[in-house]
Image (cartoon, rainbow, N blue to C red):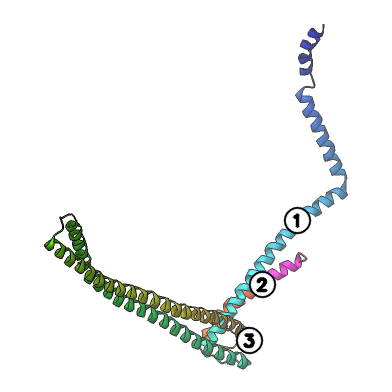
Amino acid sequence: MQLIAFQALPSLQKEGLPYWIFWGLLLVILLLFLFIFLRDKKLRLRLSSFFAGARRRSVLLRLRYLLRKERQEKEAALKRLGEKAWDSDIPVEGAETVRAALGEMVRRRDAAQMEGKNALAEMERHHKRLEESNALIDQKLQERRAQKQPLDELLKKKRDQARALKKVTPGGDIDRLADEVKREIADTIVRIEKYEHQIKEAEAEKRDYAREIAREIHHWKKRKERVQEHIKQIEARQGDLYLSLGQILEDNKMESQELHDLYAEIDLINGRIATLQRRIGTLGG
């Protein structure tokens, strides 16, 4: 009986609600939610307010980004306006202090640039000195090695001769020849050691001079880097002064044909900025 019940169990488990009843119940539940939503005005208003607020915040973020970009463009245009007026030597009423400061910055920049050129010239001069010194020492080394090479060959030959004599039966002439070969070997070694000493001295001189020149080049390189950093600071200050001069020109509208295009560009940017500010104000930003 237990076996029969166990075998019948899977067929019972397969029986259940048809799929169409499940989907029908789900549809009824969704319709109930829709009905509640349509009848509940406060719920609809809250949902509408939530989505409208999200859209408004998104629009505000984009408008503020565009406003920031326009202000950056205006600042760049004002700097170009001030720089153009300075380069063209256009007199600007009320800008005497700014023009005096710009003159001082130009003087400092020119002096720093000259110092940078001098530092670069010193670096190049030391590089050239090192190349010339290495060329002279390499020539000396080549000469000493060329002078030493025949002695190396002679020493090898005499040592081979001395080894050969040791295999011969000693005797009067053989002993004298062996002694003579030994003296020649000793004399050749002395002469070789003299050239080796000269070669080592030249190599040491080359290394020492290279270290000395490297220190000098490092000094001038650091000086050049400091000068370049100083020039960057001066140019940044110049940019601020060009901006100040451009703002004075925008306020006073000094008449000049050379500045006409820049005035027009700034007016267009001002119009776009005003439009963006109005839209941000309308959205409560």
- SS assignment at label 2: helix
Give the mark toward the camera: 1 or 2: 1
Residue type highlighted by circle 3: Ile
- Which residue, given by chain and number where applicable, does mark 3 sit on? 248
- SS assignment at label 3: helix
- Which residue, given by chain and number where applicable, does mark 2 sit on? 273
Q: Position of residue 175 (x, y in %)?
A: 16, 63
User: Left or right: 240 with respect to 285?
Assistant: left
- Mark 2 vs 3, N-terminal side: 3
Q: CA distance from mark 1 to mark 2?
A: 24 Å
The outermost residue toward the left is 173
Give the quadrant of residue 170: bottom left
Q: Is residue 271 magenta?
A: no
Residue 206 in the image: above or below residue 242: above
Q: Nearer the viewer, residue 181 or 134?
A: 181
Q: Nearer the viewer, residue 83 or 4?
A: 4
Give the quadrant of residue 141: bottom left
Residue neighbourhood size for the residue with mark 1, other residues' Cα within 10 Å, grouped as few (<14), some (14–19), many (≥20): few
- Mark 1 vs 2, N-terminal side: 1
- Which residue, given by chain and number where applicable, does mark 1 sit on? 54
Residue type highlighted by circle 2: Ile
Q: Position of residue 89 (x, y in %)?
A: 52, 90
User: Left or right: 76 with respect to 63?
Assistant: left
The outermost residue toward the top is 1
Residue neighbourhood size for the residue with mark 3, other residues' Cα within 10 Å, grouped as few (<14), some (14–19), many (≥20): some
Q: Nearer the viewer, residue 263 or 79?
A: 79
